Amino acid sequence: MTITEKLLARAAGRDEVTPGEFVSCRLDLVLANDITAPIAIDEFRRMGAEKVFDPARIALVCDHATPNRDINAATQTKKVRDFAREMGVANYWEADQGGIEHIILPDKGLVIPGDVVIGADSHTCTYGALGAFATGVGSTDAAAGMALGECWFRVPETIEVVYTGELQPWVSAKDLILKLIGEIGVAGARYRSLEFKGEVIDNLGMAGRFTICNMAIEAGAKNGVIAPDETTLSWIEGRTDREPVVLASDDDASYVRTVEIDCSALEPQVAFPHLPENTRGVSEVGDVPIDQVVIGACTNGRLEDLCAAAKVLEGRHVADGVRCIVIPGSHEIHLQATREGLVELFLESGCLVSTPTCGPCLGMHMGVLAEGERAIATTNRNFVGRMGHPKSEVYLASPVVAAASAVAGRIAGPEDL
């Protein structure tokens, strides 16, 4: 079996499962946020549930429209906060201990290797970087999960993605996943598992692995996963008291497809509007002026991402007429970045540094685009109207390309500076 099949079999109490089967699995964690939790809470009430299956295995994170952007956002947040208190859910965050859900949950040790996790947010697939099965669901499924501690799945087929060679300077995990999506398309892995492996993956730190699995959904995947290794186990040390379950695909596991990507000649990638599959190398971009840069999000809001952007921005200044917004992924990352002098560097470079929030990624607040404006961002989606006006444009790239573009006033790579 593949690692995904093993994870689902274990959670279903089965010795084995095969692709196409329907299974009911025990859940290790159920997640919802300030946009999706209020709907889930309503459904939870409607089905007659009186308590959650396990308060310790529910996580409620208010991150999309917080700090509250308006009265409606404040009302949504209060609804989630009140529910958490009523149900005894300790894993509730919105302020000083909070941040973007897909960054703080692994950091707080709530997801470890072997887990099966559902979240009422499509980028729940991020946690596959830890060797867990993690996938997004609708709010009604999240409500049922909160009440019962179970969810049903159709076992997905698996696509094997092998990254070989050696990464060139300025090429990062964001480029690896953009390259893959560019090759197979946004429906190329629809309801399939993407299993990432190869020497390049073996040499990636956890920040890069989270980035890759975060965008599995952008290829239509049910989940993305990386088998846990010493890097994984070292990273979770001290974050949890639970014992990880380390699984890996069998040598004779069956894959529906294998995609091999040679990274030796790979350059930084940029995804053009209005789909993540519209990728090209930064040297092929041409002259594309920009109005805004966003560095952060659940895809690239970790300290390592901020350090990469700072390396490009150090000693330089954001171009006139460009807004460069930097959003640390959590309160703790914001604090670390401050202690290491990154926040001061960003401010001196002409950037705006925000409190942790999803904000501009989905056109919610803290960086909404007007008609005709163009942004390059380290976020994960560039659909029509994703960051604001339907006639605005969003380009996706890594932190170093975003930072270089902020300085150049147009889409550019670090080597262009």
Image (cartoon, helix red, strand yellow):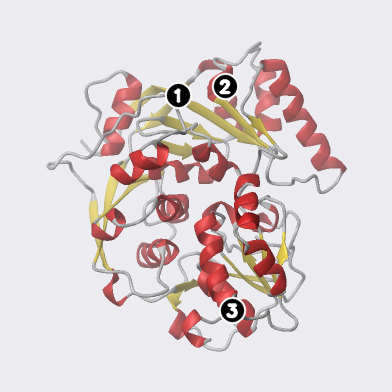
Crowding near the residue tagged with mark 1, few <14, some 14–19, many ≥20 C-alpha atoms within 10 Å: many
**Marks 2/1: CA–CA distance:** 9 Å
**Label ID, residue 146:** 2
Q: Residue beneath label 1, please?
A: 27
**Element under label 1?**
loop
**Marks 3/2: CA–CA distance:** 43 Å
The image quadrant of residue 351 is bottom right
N-terminal of the pair, mark 3 or mark 2, is 2
Q: Position of residue 223 (x, y in %)?
A: 40, 43
Circles 1 and 3 in contact, beta carbons < 8 Å: no
**Element under label 3?**
helix
Q: Position of residue 282 (x, y in %)?
A: 46, 80
Q: Is residue 220 visible?
A: no
**Marks 1/3: CA–CA distance:** 42 Å
Crowding near the residue tagged with mark 2, few <14, some 14–19, many ≥20 C-alpha atoms within 10 Å: many
Which of the two discs, 1 and 3, sits closer to the camera?
Answer: 3
